[in-house]
Image: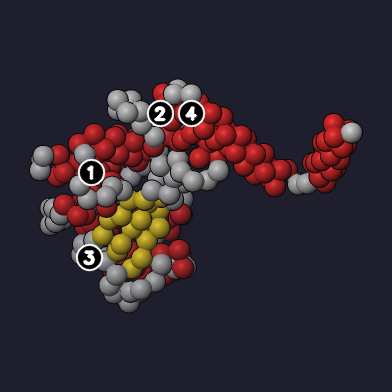
Amino acid sequence: MGYLVMGGLVLAILYFFAKWLTQSNPAKLKEVLKMLIGGLLLAFCAFLAVTGRYVIALPLAAFALSLLGWGSAQSFKFPGGFPFGGLGGASKSAGQTSNISSRFLHMELDHDSKKLEGKVLAGSFAGRALSSLQVAELKQLWRDVQPDGDSVALLEAYLDSRLSNWRVDFHADSTAGQRDTSSSSALTEKEAYEVLGLAPGASVEDIRAAHRRLIKRLHPDSGGSAFLASKLNEAKDRLLNRH
């Protein structure tokens, strides 16, 4: 009798689950399946840990937690220091940004999307986000920042990402890309960490890895900015020289 009741319950659960699957939208279904798989993997990891198979259980648990949204699988490391790269083979952390400031501007680069955003620090547009400025306002800002080479380079990197023909529209002459930037100030240690998107005290390995990852994306040969690439190199050298 007990088996019949248990069997009936299982069939009822399967029926309602199948009905729910047919009515759910794909995005919600994907999220639920991820949670279900993550939970089952965690239970399996607990079994492996109890039986002493920690070498398999630990990296598998890291992946299960990433499915559940509690961490990043690629950040897990074996006790011996061997990196666990995750099933996707990703090598970057989600949500990381690089920050750099000049006399007129503060810029932030999102590592994942490569989107460059900025805020005006001084002048008639102080406090405004670059994304809120109209083309005419950006043109005026471009004129205003001419005395500072770093600000010009940062703003032009932003304009390159937002307006394809801005150089023509702004009537830039042939010397626009040859300004004297010798007055550019050297990065401080704090600024160098921000440029590379690292926390203070990062190891040599982390510094080199961050530089290598970002330079691939921002190098002029990959459609990036020569100025930002030079700042990445400067930040790396600044931090490595202190070790």
Pointer 2 or 1: first along the chain: 2
Quadrant showing the C terminus: top left
Q: Which secondary structure lies at badge 4?
A: helix
Residue underneath mark 3: 103
Crowding at mark 2 (Cα within 10 Å: few <14, some 14-19, many 20+) = some
Disc 1 marks which residue?
202
The three-letter code of the residue at mark 2 reads Phe
**Image coords of residue 160 (percent x, y):** 40, 51
Q: Nearer the viewer, mark 4 or mark 1?
A: 4
SS for dot 3 = loop
Q: Quadrant location of the N terminus?
A: top right
Quarter of the view holding residue 145: bottom left
Which residue is denoted by mark 2 in the rendering?
84
Disc nearer the start of the sequence (2/4):
4
In the depicted structure, whether residue 190 falls above or below residue 25: below
Residue receiving disc 4: 50
